[in-house]
Image: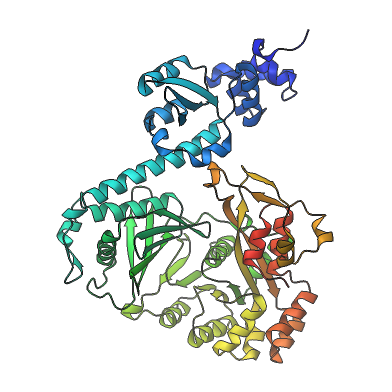
């Protein structure tokens, strides 16, 4: 007798398809009542099956179609909003399509009669259910209802825009109005910042274009457009941000820098504000720094095992300088604070001088530079050195004076951590000499240089095989023969990654150890290329090689390798 899944129990279907064993089904049946879940959900909770296997079994049993995830990338928000958000979230449903007399609704449980009956009453139409996994549904609900909420709030703010008192002659916003809870500019600024925090954005760009204003967030290192307030509202938004940052609201011709401290019930955020005049008006860039507890460790940053062993060795030395280099936003401060966290103990006095203090690290003494009151990097460093430090973190070497203090501290028994803006590890050494540190002092004091970048990781939900073009292989420095041995991967975009193909970032690292040969070359004023050549011969892995290694593991794509590194 042939097996008919329509007349079988879910456990029997999964057993027939080879996804579970009889003992696993029996175990789930015993624990089902404890979890207060259906058998399929219980098997999933116990880790015996995957969501995909459960969805396929339900499809066989109930004959409902499984939602095509590609259709979830571009749903009509008017259709989604037919179902109120609280009902959709509580009952695990989302409207995805509408015809004259029917609404297609994606559901985790299409056989839930009370839910389908209530949907008919809400929509006043027939329901056509399709199956969707719980994880995919959660991401889709969050994506679209968040967008619907944001759109509604923007329209609400814009609708009341005429009540804001802005003196066009003086270019000043009415500060009294800005304090009112219903002031639309206040609503807009609060909305921009709160949505950026929810999106885990590192930067907010508020920029005037010729016919509209544009708001973009930098998430995972890439900018994405999130909203477009009317251009008429732009001046009011900029003025309010100036008020919050204690900047001159009447000055529109010169750049200004300030900061805002924000506190909520869940977290504190420090916002660094930069305002610069453009041909279309003033552009605002706001950098968000989470002032919460530091949650990173060296093992979570993306180090390969060999590199991690080398780095750990040098950060435990009693003296010398360890430099982390790279452009802004490449994770230098994160790596340094993770290193401090690694060596933190009761016997060690760790002090930091930073501008700004990006992470709070309990157990260390952190000093924030305040140029306006005379607390400069150099004066703060001199004060810190009088506080009996064992380890000193200098936020950044910016000039000869800071570099000189760092070098002298390292030569007098202190372990110094710092950052420098440079393209790679060898150029960091020559950059230090260019700043004004004599080559013999650089050679004597430097322990290690770590150059780093952050590459985006392929989204685990939509990652798939990829065949790169000839141009991509050439740009990545990969021969056609080598390409045949690599299983290239790329994220194609889905609801889980906001259709970007990437989710999260990981580090790639280039570690230059100052061995005897390299120190001698630095003493002899060797140039950047000579240092690089010798370092590669003695085992240094380049940034490009590190990125290719991540690509070969399927962690990132060939496009990220091309975008962030240069072929050796």
Q: Position of residue 63 (x, y in %)?
A: 61, 18
Q: Position of residue 372 (x, y in %)?
A: 32, 78
Visible residue check, residue 309: no
Q: Nearer the viewer, residue 406 or 201?
A: 201
Left or right: 34 with respect to 170? right
**Residue furthest out toward the front:** 100
At x 68%, y 84%, the residue is 528
Query: At which x and y percent is residue 490?
Result: 66, 51
Q: Nearer the viewer, residue 458 or 224?
A: 224
Residue 116 percent location from the top left of the image: 44, 18
| Depth check, front residue: 560 or 80 | 80
The quadrant of the picture occupied by the N terminus is top right
Q: Is residue 159 left or right of residue 313?
A: left
Can you say whether 15 is above or below 458 in the image?
A: above
Query: In this view of the protein, which residue sits in the foreground, 554 or 325?
Result: 554
Residue 24 visible in this rendered orientation of the protein = yes
Q: Quick check: 104 above or below 342? A: above
Which residue appears at 66% of the width and 19% of the height? 27
């Amino acid at each position: 007798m042939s097996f008919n899944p329509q007349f079988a129990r879910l456990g029997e279907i999964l057993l027939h398809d080879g996804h579970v064993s009889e003992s696993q089904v029996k175990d789930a049946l015993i624990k089902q009542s404890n979890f207060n879940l259906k058998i399929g959900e219980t098997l999933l909770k116990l880790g015996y099956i995957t969501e995909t296997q459960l969805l396929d079994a339900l499809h066989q049993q109930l004959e409902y179609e499984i939602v095509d995830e590609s259709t979830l990338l571009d749903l009509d928000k008017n259709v989604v909003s037919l179902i109120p958000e609280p009902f959709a979230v509580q009952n695990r449903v989302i409207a995805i399509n509408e015809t004259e007399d029917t609404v297609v609704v994606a559901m985790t449980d299409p056989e839930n009669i009370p839910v389908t009956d209530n949907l008919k009453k809400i929509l006043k139409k027939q329901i056509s259910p399709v199956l969707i996994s719980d994880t995919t549904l959660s991401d889709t609900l969050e994506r679209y209802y968040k967008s619907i909420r944001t759109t509604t709030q923007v329209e609400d703010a814009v609708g009341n825009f005429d009540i804001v008192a802005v003196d066009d002659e003086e270019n000043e916003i009415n500060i009294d109005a800005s304090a009112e809870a219903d002031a639309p500019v206040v609503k807009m600024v609060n909305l921009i910042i709160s949505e950026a925090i929810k999106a885990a954005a590192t930067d907010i760009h508020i920029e005037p274009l010729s016919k509209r204003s544009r708001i973009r967030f930098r998430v995972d290192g890439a900018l994405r457009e999130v909203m477009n307030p009317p251009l008429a509202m732009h001046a009011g938004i900029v003025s309010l941000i100036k008020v919050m940052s204690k900047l001159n609201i009447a000055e529109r011709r010169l750049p200004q820098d300030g900061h805002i401290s924000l506190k909520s019930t869940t977290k504190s955020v420090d916002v660094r504000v930069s305002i610069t005049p453009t041909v279309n008006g003033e552009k605002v860039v706001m950098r968000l720094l989470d002032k919460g507890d530091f949650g990173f460790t060296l093992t979570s940053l993306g180090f390969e095992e060999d590199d991690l062993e080398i780095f750990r060795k040098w950060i435990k030395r009693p003296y010398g300088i360890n430099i982390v280099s790279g452009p802004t936003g490449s994770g230098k401060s994160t790596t340094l604070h993770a290193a401090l966290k690694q060596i933190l103990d009761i016997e060690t006095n760790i002090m930091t001088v930073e501008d700004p203090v990006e992470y709070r690290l309990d157990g260390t003494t952190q000093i924030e530079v305040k140029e306006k009151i005379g607390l400069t990097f150099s004066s703060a460093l001199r004060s810190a050195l009088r506080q009996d430090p064992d380890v000193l973190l200098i936020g950044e070497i910016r000039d000869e004076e800071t570099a000189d203090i760092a070098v002298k501290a390292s030569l007098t028994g202190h372990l110094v951590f710092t950052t420098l803006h440079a393209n790679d590890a060898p150029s960091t050494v020559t950059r230090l000499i260019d700043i004004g540190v004599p080559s013999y002092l650089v050679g004597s004091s430097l322990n290690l240089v770590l150059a780093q970048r952050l590459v985006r990781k392929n989204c685990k939900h939509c990652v798939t095989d990829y065949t790169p073009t000839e141009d991509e292989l050439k740009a990545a420095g990969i021969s056609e023969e080598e390409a045949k041995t690599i299983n290239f991967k790329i994220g194609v975009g889905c609801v889980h990654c906001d259709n970007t193909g990437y989710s999260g970032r990981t580090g790639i690292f280039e570690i230059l150890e100052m061995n005897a040969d390299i120190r001698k070359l630095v003493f002899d004023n060797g140039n950047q290329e000579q240092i690089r050549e010798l370092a590669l011969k003695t085992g240094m892995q380049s940034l490009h090689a590190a990125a290719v290694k991540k690509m070969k593991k399927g962690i990132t794509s060939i496009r990220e390798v091309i975008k962030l590194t240069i072929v050796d």
